[in-house]
Image (tube, grey):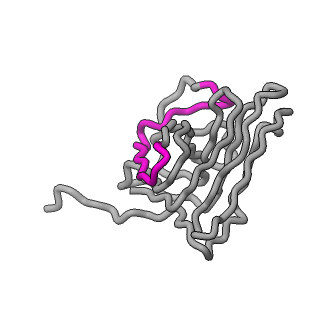
Amino acid sequence: MTLFSSMPPQLLFDFTKKSNIQDWRVVDDVVMGGVSAGSFTLDSDGFGVFEGAISLENNGGFSSVRYRFPKVETEGYSKIVIKLKGDGKKYQFRIKTNSGDSHSFIAPFSTSGEWEEIEISLQDMYPAFRGRTLEQPNFSDAHFEEIAFLIGNKKMEQFKLIIDRIELK
């Protein structure tokens, strides 16, 4: 009789010098008239780099980078683990059950300025749309097909988030 079954980690993305990042898409507040500017590139060490400048002009104030993929099943998994190096600022990690959904499930996290592993409990990710928390349950779906990082701290600032890998555990 097995009392505890451990699923092997599922790699969602592992950045290397050979990574194809063409399916990672930057979405800034320009979609609503803002002027923030983010970019997503691979650095010389093969890490994903999400960086740019947030502006509050024209009611703007955010930048995000999104990655869609075939549905990933969540049964047997409870968290997302991200190895990254931030700049001491606050970010959000987001998932969408279906890429066409208008809302995302969100987990805010702070960065230390050092390499670290951020652990995000799937069941703690709350639903939100355009910055407003929705009156519906936290994430409990059997799959998801989009992940994203977003910065939007209601202030003008430069940002830089370096990402090594993202796993489902």
Furthest residue toward left = 1
Q: Is residue 51 left or right of residue 1?
A: right
User: Residue at point 64% right, 65% down?
Assistant: 43
Q: Nearer the viewer, residue 14 or 71?
A: 14
Camera-nearest residue between 12 and 83: 83
Question: Could you tell me residue 67's position as x and y percent?
Answer: 64, 56
What residue range appears in magenta? 112-132
Dividing the picture into quadrants, the one containing residue 68 is bottom right
Does 142 sit left or right of 68 as displayed? left
Quarter of the rendering containing residue 59: top right
| Quarter of the image with the N terminus in it | bottom left
Residue 117 drawn at (x, y percent): 41, 52
In the displayed image of the protein, which residue is found farthest to the bottom? 18
Q: How many marks?
A: 0
Q: Of residues 35 and 169, which is closer to you in this image?
A: 35
Let me know if residue 143 is in the magenta part.
no
Tell me residue 129's x, y (percent): 65, 31
> From the viewer's perspective, is residue 90 above or below residue 155?
below
The residue lying at 56 percent from left, 39 percent from top is: 92
Q: Nearer the viewer, residue 126 or 26?
A: 26
Compared with 101, 20 (above or below) is below
Q: Is residue 121 magenta?
A: yes
Residue 53 % position (x, y) = 73, 41
For the C terminus, give its image quadrant: bottom left
**What residue do we see at 46% from left, 56% from top?**
83
